[in-house]
Amino acid sequence: MAKRCYYEILEVERTVSSDELKKSYRRLAMKFHPDRNPDDPSTEEKFKEAKEAFETLSDPQKRAAYDQFGHAGVNPGAGGGAGFGGGAGFADIFGEVFGDIFGGGGGGGGGRSRAYRGADMQYHLNITLEEAVRGTTVDIQIPTTETCDVCHGSGAKPGTGKKACGTCKGAGAVRVQQGFFAIQQTCPTCGGSGEIIEDPCTACRGSGRIETKKTLTIKIPAGVDTGDRLRHTGEGGPGEQGGPAGDLYILIEVKPHPIFKRNDADLLCDMPISFVTAALGGEIEVPTLDGRVELKIPAETQTGKVFRLRGKGVQPVRGGAPGDLLVSVHVETPVKLTNEQRDLLHAFEQSLTGGSGGEIAEQHRPRERSFLDSVKRFFDDLRGE
């Protein structure tokens, strides 16, 4: 009797993906399994047929041979044709198809051979603005674990050892079955190791490792900023069952600076200047991260004027042109004046009014006149004039 097409058996197209193939087989296996159909003997043949088709098409090499040569290109005897009668119960099928969901896999070793990657760790590192701009090297201490020097990593008290777990018989996994439904899961007694410790080491409490700290030298590249993360591969938590260690992430936090504020690659600085310098002009000393520089202040400078010093900012860590230093000047009003200084200011004010004691001439206060005109227009608009 000619065999049916495997794709027809699994009710899929020839272009089906591996995920869809597995999904279709899962549905048919649940539908035709004899344990679910004790009163319908014909389902056993359909179940065996679906299993044979899936085992062939789920193997890329076998599928390619089947697509090219049909049944002659594969060996059905190695597939599911003899599988069910040889003891492939529903729990075995479930493990093959559903094992990836529960972590049991298709193998019989359960959790014993699974290696687990260590956890990633994060360290908050506070540095100064100068260190962030120029780069630096710092030593940090992070928690870690190392092999217990009392039991040498076995977890057992010296002179004793481990024995096979009585729950899973050393397999590291147990199988739980309810009717036709069964799953394989990590043994709850030994945690998947297949062994138990009757007399734990007192130093490490049976874990085989003790908590300690290690010192790492961290190189901070020039130009980093708050929120940047530096990754150090393999410096995180240790792996289990021979798995690799996790990674360590250094989270940068730049401390506030008493003079400068940072905006990406630019630095901002507020600079007080005297009333005389603002009015007559002059030169002032401005601090930069490279030292002091002279800044020329033109006459009649107003509060809030921003001067840009090119290239005096930060060189970005990811490359590009260095930023600028933006200096915002603020005219400082004199305080604690003497009587003589007050008289001089009154005389100065009279000179601005032409000695008449009236309003100061408009050319001496352009910003005030502009502001007052804007206020007048605002109230005129409110009155609808």
Image: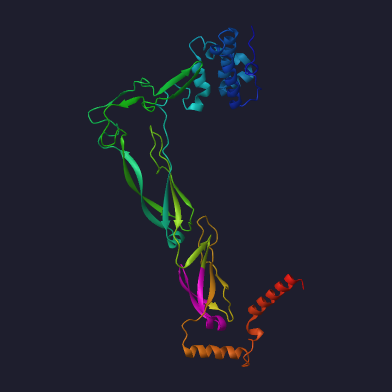
Identity of the residue furthest to the bottom in this view: 355
Instruction: Work out whether 271 lies above or below 350.
Output: above
Q: Residue 235 versus residue 329: which sits nearer the camera? A: 329
The N terminus sits in image quarter: top right
Q: Position of residue 231 (x, y in %)?
A: 45, 47
- Residue visible at 61% across and 21% down in the picture: 24
Instruction: Work out whether 16 lies above or below 69.
Output: below
Magenta range is 269-295
Q: Position of residue 36 (x, y in %)?
A: 55, 13
- Residue visible at 57% across and 15% down in the picture: 52
- Residue visible at 64% across and 79% down in the picture: 368
Q: Position of residue 180 (x, y in %)?
A: 51, 16
Instruction: Work out whether 333 lies above or below 101.
Output: below
Q: Quadrant of residue 353?
A: bottom right
- Residue visible at 59% across and 91% down in the picture: 351
The C terminus sits in image quarter: bottom right
